[in-house]
C-alpha cells in the first residue's frame, strides 16, 4: 500500500511524519557539524532505552565491584533510565574528544623506570570536567538558538550517566573488553560527554565490535582487575585505588602498583586499536602541564601542600587532595626502593626517611610500609 491508498487523514499524517523525520535528520547534520566545529572529534545520537545495559549494571553492583564508590549504588537504576534523571529526555547527543598529549609509547617505557612518576595520560592536561562541560554547553546553546527553548542538560562524568552504553548506542564506538569505549579511528584515549535533550532526534546506528579474540587488555592489567571480558572489579583497579579510594590502599596490592601514582593506562597501552589513537587538537589537552610526563617520584614527593595546590590548579589531579597524592607517591617509592636499580632505590630511601614523621596518617602509613624490611 502506498500513501495514495491511505485515507486522506492517514496520508496527511504519514506525510507530516516523513517531513518531520527529514527535518530532524537535517537538524542532526547541523548539530554534528557544529559539534565538530567546536572541537569535538565525534558526535552521535542515541535513544534512551538502556534496558539491556541495566541488568549488567545491577549484577556489577550486586557483586560489589564498585568498591567504596557509594554513589554508584546510591543512584542505581537511574543511570540506565535517562528520563528519570532528567524528566522529559527523549534522546541523547553524545560527544567524544581526544585527550592524548604525551607519546603513549614513551609512557609505556616509563613503567620500566622505577624512579619515574607515572600519571595517567588523561590527567596530563587541564581538568576535562570543566573543558568538556563548557564545550557541551556551547553546543546546547547553539541548538537552542536554532530550535528555540527546549529541555536539556549537559554531562561529562558528572552524574549517574551510563556514558559508554550511550556512546556505544550512538555509534561513536563500541565497548571494549576492558569496559572502555573503542573506536577504529581513535582507539580509546578520549573523553566522553552527553547532552540529554527533549528533542526526539533519530538515533544513529551502533557500530560492530572489533575486539575479536584479543585479550591484550586483561593480560596487561597489573592487578587482574579485568575479571572477565567486559567486567571490571574496581576494587583491584589501580585507577580506583589511586584516585577513588579515600582510605589506605590495601597492603596486598601495593607491590603491584609499581610507579603508577595517579591512574593506570596499562589496558589501553596494550590495546592494538590504540595504534590509531589521535593526538588532542584541543589546546587544554594538547600540552602536558608541569612536566608530568617526565617527572620523578622523588621530585613530586618533595612538593609541599602549597606546591600541590598551586601546580595542580585546573587539573583533575587536585580533586584527590594532597594527602592521597603523597601517599600514592610513597607507595611507589617503596616499590622503587625494592627495585634492582640501586641508585634509584637509594634516592627513594632518602626521600622516604625525610617524611617518617609526616603529620598525615595516610602518608605516614605509606611511608612506614615503604621503608619496612622486605
Image (spheres, grey):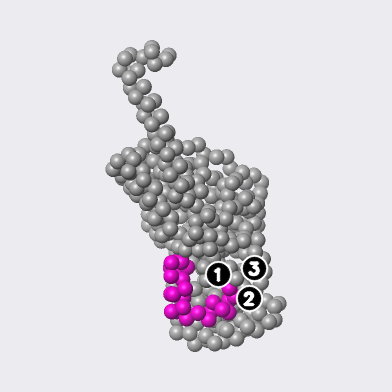
Q: Quadrant of the N terminus?
A: top left
Q: Residues within 10 Å of mark 2 (few under 14, many from 20)?
A: many
Residue nearest the observer in this picture, 129 or 231 = 129
Question: In the image, which is nearer the foreground, mark 1 or mark 3?
Answer: 1
**Where on the picture, by quarter, is residue 159?**
bottom left
Residue nearest the observer in this picture, 82 or 104 = 104
Q: Residues within 10 Å of mark 1 (few under 14, many from 20)?
A: some
Question: Marks 1 and 3: CB-CB under 8 Å?
Answer: no
Q: Which mark is residue 292?
A: 1
Distance between the Cα atoms at labels 1 and 2?
A: 13 Å
Residue plotted at (46% across, 71% down):
312
The answer to if 150 sits in the magenta stretch is: no
Taking the image as shown, residue 34 lies to the left or right of residue 172, namely: left
Q: Which residue is mark 2?
A: 115
The answer to if 313 sits in the magenta stretch is: yes
Q: Position of residue 330 (x, y in %)?
A: 55, 78
Q: Which residue is mark 3?
A: 110
**Where on the picture, by quarter, is residue 110?**
bottom right
Q: Secondary structure at mark 2?
A: loop
Q: Residues within 10 Å of mark 3 (few under 14, many from 20)?
A: some
The magenta span reads 295-320
Residue plotted at (60% across, 78% down):
334
Amino acid at each position: 500500500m502506498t500513501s495514495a491508498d491511505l485515507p486522506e487523514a492517514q496520508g496527511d499524517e504519514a506525510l507530516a511524519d516523513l517531513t518531520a523525520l527529514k527535518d530532524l535528520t537535517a537538524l542532526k547534520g547541523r548539530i554534528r557539524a557544529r559539534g565538530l566545529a567546536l572541537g569535538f572529534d565525534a558526535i552521535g545520537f542515541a535513544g534512551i532505552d538502556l534496558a539491556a545495559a541495566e541488568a549488567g549494571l545491577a549484577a556489577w553492583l550486586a557483586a560489589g565491584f564498585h568498591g567504596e564508590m557509594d554513589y554508584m549504588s546510591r543512584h542505581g537504576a537511574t543511570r540506565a533510565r535517562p528520563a528519570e534523571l532528567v524528566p522529559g529526555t527523549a534522546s541523547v547527543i553524545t560527544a567524544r574528544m581526544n585527550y592524548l598529549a604525551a607519546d603513549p609509547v614513551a609512557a609505556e617505557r616509563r613503567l620500566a623506570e622505577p624512579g619515574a612518576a607515572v600519571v595517567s595520560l588523561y590527567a596530563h592536561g587541564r581538568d576535562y570536567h570543566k573543558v568538556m562541560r563548557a564545550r557541551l554547553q556551547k553546543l546546547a546553546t547553539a541548538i537552542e538558538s536554532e530550535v528555540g527553548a527546549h529541555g536539556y542538560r549537559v554531562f561529562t562524568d558528572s552524574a549517574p550517566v551510563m556514558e559508554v552504553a550511550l556512546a556505544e548506542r550512538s555509534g561513536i564506538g563500541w565497548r571494549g573488553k576492558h569496559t572502555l569505549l573503542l573506536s577504529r579511528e581513535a582507539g580509546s584515549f578520549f573523553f566522553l560527554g552527553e547532552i540529554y535533550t527533549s528533542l526526539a532526534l533519530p538515533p544513529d546506528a551502533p557500530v560492530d565490535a572489533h575486539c575479536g579474540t584479543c585479550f591484550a587488555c586483561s593480560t596487561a592489567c597489573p592487578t587482574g582487575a579485568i575479571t572477565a571480558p567486559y567486567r571490571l572489579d574496581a576494587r583491584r583497579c589501580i585507577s580506583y585505588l589511586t584516585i577513588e579510594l579515600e582510605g589506605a590502599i590495601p597492603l596486598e596490592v601495593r607491590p603491584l602498583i609499581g610507579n603508577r601514582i595517579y591512574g593506570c593506562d596499562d589496558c589501553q597501552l596494550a590495546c592494538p586499536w590504540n595504534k590509531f589513537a589521535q593526538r588532542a587538537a584541543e589546546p587544554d589537552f594538547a600540552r602536558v602541564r608541569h612536566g608530568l610526563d617526565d617527572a620523578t617520584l622523588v621530585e613530586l614527593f618533595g612538593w609541599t601542600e602549597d606546591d600541590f595546590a598551586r601546580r595542580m590548579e585546573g587539573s583533575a589531579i587536585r580533586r584527590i587532595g594532597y594527602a592521597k597524592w603523597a601517599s600514592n607517591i610513597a607507595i611507589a617509592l617503596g616499590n622503587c626502593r625494592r627495585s634492582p636499580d640501586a641508585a634509584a632505590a637509594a634516592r627513594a630511601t632518602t626521600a622516604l626517611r625525610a617524611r617518617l614523621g609526616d603529620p598525615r596518617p595516610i602518608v605516614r602509613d605509606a611511608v612506614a610500609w615503604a621503608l619496612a624490611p622486605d
